[in-house]
């Protein structure tokens, strides 16, 4: 009983639980969107929407050049009373994101004819694909605002902004354009409008937390300095994206839109574990940074408690998801049961990925990101090579196997380097204070 009371009063567990509730809300909304897409559209058109979502996410992520990770690191590490610094950091990040996003929008427009034929196989109108480029800007604004909320320890609201807000926008627009959504290219137009609304409304979510203080602070880096500081963190986000979404992109390239739909449904179901992982990330990462910088004597206990929490949650989630896989897939459409084997492989891959979460945080906190980048680079190369070899032979199961192999390599390298570089030392005096 005392252990239970202790757990219920542990702020790490309380905040993690709240974050998971927020994350589950986002998962439910995103699944509602995915189910509507699969139920209302053909396999080919559903594949087009899912692939477009991946392109927007990927281009937006690359264009942020690590700024989302940097704002969490810098703002979470700052003292709580440095309000001007935090506010100025957010403003400068917005300005830099807008400039770089505009550059990538231009690249998108130039590459649209090639992308339309190579990945979408001509199943999307060129004008729609070009208009979708503006989603990069709005998607980035939403992400920056969400990560700022994460940095100031409003993790539940951060998760809702990042996951629930896009789902709500999409569902509301589908409701108002029900007949249009299912005809012609309506599904693409509705997606573009929903993501634009998401970026716009994210400013209203973050607004209550930036009312006080000044927009200027001499300690906040200007655009050039901000860009230089963010670059070492950029590969982390890019390689993470490639590890998650490279398979779907290559399925689109090698197999076509129908297989993209099947693989993406399997991937979305497997990403439920990543949503839980993201909830833990939003709770653990800012606290770990604060403890690392201001209370190092508490770091050992906090790190291993957080690691145990991550593994326990993800093992439970993976087991439940595998047990319910048939029921979940048939909700989309009976045709999607063909993705069951790929789903089983992807669930195991995500569990392996979760094992490296807290270890990865320590590389960032100790400013030894280059080692993490090495691990991610090796894993990404393994992923790409395995995809090229396995997809033409084994189809979507080959893509899932590539993800499993890459995540296994990643966790092995990250944990090995963690101990080799001695990133965590046991305190000389045991810490009695609860985390």
Image: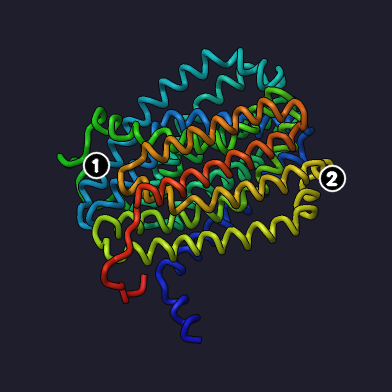
For the question of whether residue 368 can be seen, the reply is: yes
Q: Give residue 125's quadrant in the image.
A: top right
Using the image, determine if residue 419 lies above or below residue 403. Answer: below
Q: Residue visible at 39% across and 48% down?
A: 420
Front disc: 2 or 1: 2
Give the distance between the C-alpha atoms of the residues marked 2 and 1, in whole angstroms.
Answer: 51 Å
Q: Which residue bears the numbered disc 1?
A: 88
Q: Residue at 52%, 42% (x, y): give it.
A: 410
- The answer to whether 139 appears left or right of 49 in the picture is left
Q: Is residue 401 left or right of residue 351?
A: right
Quick one: label 2, few (<14), some, or many (20+) residues within 10 Å?
A: few
Residue 179 visible somewhere in the drawing:
no
Q: Position of residue 414 (x, y in %)?
A: 46, 45
| Percent x, y of residue 385 | 61, 27
Q: Which scheme is used to colour this image of the protein?
A: rainbow
Name the residue beneath numbered marker 2. 334
Mark 1 closeness class: few <14, some 14–19, many ≥20 residues within 10 Å: many
State the image quarter where residue 45 is shown.
top right
Q: Residue at x 71, y 39 (%)?
A: 37
Q: Which mark is residue 423?
A: none
The vertical placement of 288 against 389, above or below, is: below
Q: Of all residues shown, which one is farthest toward the left?
A: 218
């Amino acid at each position: 009983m005392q252990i239970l009371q202790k757990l219920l009063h542990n702020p790490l567990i309380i905040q993690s639980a709240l974050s998971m509730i927020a994350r589950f809300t986002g998962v439910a909304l995103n699944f509602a969107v995915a189910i509507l897409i699969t139920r209302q559209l053909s396999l080919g058109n559903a594949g087009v929407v899912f692939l477009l979502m991946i392109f927007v996410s990927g281009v937006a992520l690359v264009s942020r050049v690590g700024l989302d990770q940097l704002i969490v690191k810098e703002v979470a590490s700052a003292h709580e009373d440095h309000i001007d610094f935090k506010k100025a950091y957010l403003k400068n990040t917005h300005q830099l994101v807008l400039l770089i996003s505009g550059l990538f929008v231009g690249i998108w427009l130039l590459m649209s004819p090639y992308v339309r034929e190579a990945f979408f196989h001509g199943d999307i109108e060129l004008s729609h694909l070009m208009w979708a480029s503006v989603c990069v800007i709005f998607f980035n604004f939403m992400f920056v605002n969400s990560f700022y909320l994460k940095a100031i320890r409003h993790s539940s609201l951060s998760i809702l902004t990042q996951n629930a807000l896009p789902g709500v926008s999409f569902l509301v627009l589908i409701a108002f354009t029900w007949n249009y959504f299912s005809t012609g290219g309506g599904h693409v137009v509705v997606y573009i409008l929903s993501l634009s609304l998401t970026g716009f409304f994210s400013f209203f979510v973050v607004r209550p937390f930036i009312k006080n203080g000044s927009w200027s602070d001499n300690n906040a880096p200007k655009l050039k300095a901000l860009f230089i500081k963010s670059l070492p963190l950029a590969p982390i986000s890019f390689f993470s994206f490639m590890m998650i979404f490279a398979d779907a992109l290559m399925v689109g390239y090698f197999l076509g839109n129908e297989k993209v739909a099947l693989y993406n449904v399997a991937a979305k179901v497997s990403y439920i574990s990543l949503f839980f992982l993201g909830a833990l990330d939003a709770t653990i990462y800012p606290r770990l940074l604060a403890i690392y910088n201001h209370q190092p004597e508490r770091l050992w206990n906090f790190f291993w408690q957080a690691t145990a929490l991550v593994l326990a949650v993800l093992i439970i989630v993976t087991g439940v998801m595998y047990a319910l896989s048939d029921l979940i897939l048939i909700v989309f459409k009976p045709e999607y049961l063909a993705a069951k084997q790929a789903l089983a492989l992807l669930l195991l891959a995500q569990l392996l990925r979760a094992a490296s979460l807290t270890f990865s945080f320590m590389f960032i906190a100790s400013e030894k990101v280059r080692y993490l980048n090495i691990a991610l680079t090796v894993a990404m190369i393994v992923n790409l090579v395995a995809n090229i070899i396995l997809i033409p032979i084994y189809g979507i199961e080959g893509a899932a196997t590539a993800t499993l192999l890459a995540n296994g390599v990643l966790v092995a390298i990250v944990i090995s380097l963690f101990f080799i570089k001695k990133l965590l030392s046991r305190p000389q005096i045991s810490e009695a204070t609860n985390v």
